[in-house]
Image (cartoon, rainbow, N blue to C red):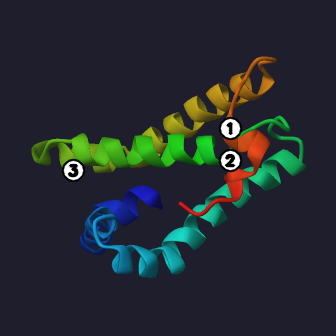
């Protein structure tokens, strides 16, 4: 879903708008109050439900995990040369699955580490709006 969204004409426009909004406080506030903050919280709720079901360790950072997945996919799309877009698009599902697997492995290992120091795990920033 994320891949399709950011590769669509509307998705790329929204992505550019989000980037530019950081320079314009009124626009940033309007976007933050709408779907962007809600989508971040929705994604994090998926992680919180997995923690509640015991599928992820209690110390898993929902913010870190969702940032890893979304960041990797956005970077992959933006870094792909135009001439390779069709080939990359045809394997988007495989790539997304590999990103999720890698992020889950890392998140589980980090959450299980006794010395893991993830700020949002301790101070509630996991609930912050991005």
For the residues labelled 1 and 3, say whether their Cβ atoms are less than 8 Å apart.
no
Across and down, in percent, residue 5 comes to: 38, 65
Q: Which residue occupies 68% across, 47% down?
A: 62
Badge 3 is on which residue?
86
Disc nearer the start of the sequence (2/1): 2
Disc nearer the start of the sequence (2/3): 2
**Rendering quarter of residue 105:** top right
Badge 2 is on which residue?
62
Decide which of 32, 52 is in the foreground and name it. Answer: 32
For the residues labelled 2 and 1, say whether their Cβ atoms are less than 8 Å apart.
no
Q: Is residue 93 left or right of residue 122?
A: left
Q: Is residue 121 left or right of residue 100?
A: right
Q: CA distance from mark 2 to mark 3?
A: 32 Å
**Rendering quarter of residue 19:** bottom left
Disc nearer the start of the sequence (1/3): 3
Q: Residues within 10 Å of mark 1 (few under 14, many from 20)?
A: few
Residue 76 lies, with reference to residue 118, above or below; the image says below
Which secondary structure lies at badge 1?
A: helix
Which of the labelled discs sits on residue 119, or is there none?
Answer: 1
Residue 14 lies, with reference to residue 87, above or below; the image says below
**Rendering quarter of residue 44:** bottom right
Across and down, in percent, residue 61 comes to: 70, 41
Which secondary structure lies at badge 2?
A: helix
């Amino acid at each position: 879903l994320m891949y399709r969204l950011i590769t669509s004409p509307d998705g790329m426009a929204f992505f550019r708008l989000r980037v530019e909004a950081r320079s314009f406080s009124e626009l940033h506030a309007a976007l933050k109050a709408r779907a962007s903050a809600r989508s971040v919280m929705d994604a994090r709720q998926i992680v919180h439900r997995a923690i509640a079901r015991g599928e992820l360790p209690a110390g898993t950072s929902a913010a870190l995990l969702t940032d890893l997945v979304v960041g990797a996919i956005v970077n992959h799309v933006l870094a792909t040369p135009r001439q390779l877009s069709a080939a990359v698009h045809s394997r988007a599902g495989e790539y997304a699955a590999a990103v999720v697997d890698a992020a889950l492995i890392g998140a589980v290992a980090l959450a299980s580490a006794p010395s893991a120091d993830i700020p949002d795990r301790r101070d509630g920033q996991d609930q912050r709006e991005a």
